[in-house]
Image (spheres, helix red, strand yellow):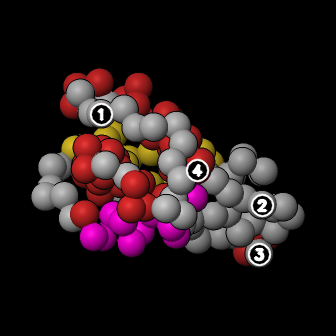
Amino acid sequence: MRLLTHNFLKSNVKGTENGYPLNIEATTLKYEESPVNKPFILNLLPKLNYAAFYSAVQQLSPHCTEYSLPEIPSDIDTSNVDVIDEETIGKLHTWLLDVYLVEGFLVCPDTGRKFPVKDCIPNMILHEDEI
């Protein structure tokens, strides 16, 4: 699961006030480099919750030491993407699209409910008593 996907997921467990952003407990990660698609990143940024994305990067960084991935800025004005430089776009692309959570859990910040991630696929299905 890419961090791009993570940014749009939330917990819908009954009794959850917000359920967003989900915390990440990583077991296995992988990194696959891909060509930077600047127009895609620039179109995506206004839709992205940057604070949640930055938090996810901070949670995964300790597990990615073997890949020497770039640091990203703690804050970006996503409403004015024209001022973002090429280097920053490349760094954002790396974390959004090239880093995968292969195995682990997404954890609801309100209830603590753990949603498993297996083979890069998050299982967000709720049990009957959680609906």
Amino acid beneath label 2: Asn
**Amino acid type indicated by mark 3:** Ile
Residue ID for mark 1: 70
Residue wearing tag 2: 18
| Alpha carbons under labels 4 and 3: distance apart | 25 Å
First-in-chain label (3 vs 2): 2
* Residue at 65% in and 70% down: 126
Does dot 3 land on a helix, a strand or a loop?
loop
| Magenta-colored stretch includes residue 124 | no
Q: Residue at x 41, y 68 (%)?
A: 44
Mark 2–mark 4 contact, CB under 8 Å? no
Answer above or below: position of 131 versus 69: below
Element at label 4: helix
**Which of the two discs, 4 and 3, labels the residue nearer the N terminus?**
4
Distance of label 2 from label 4 (alpha carbons): 13 Å
Mark carried by residue 131: 3
For badge 4, the amino acid type reads Ala
> How far is the residue under mark 2 from the one under mark 1?
30 Å
Question: In front of the other: label 3 or label 2?
Answer: 2
Crowd class of label 1 (few under 14; some 14 to 19; many from 20; radius 10 Å): some
Indicate which label's residue lies in the foreground, 2 or 4.
4
Instruction: Please provide percent x and percent y for residue 29.
Output: 31, 41
Q: Which residues are magenta?
A: 39-50
Q: Looking at the image, which is closer to me, 122 or 48?
A: 48
Residue that label 4 marks: 52
Q: Residue furthest front?
A: 83
Q: Is residue 26 left or right of residue 106?
A: left
Is residue 114 left or right of 74 when viewed as pictured? right
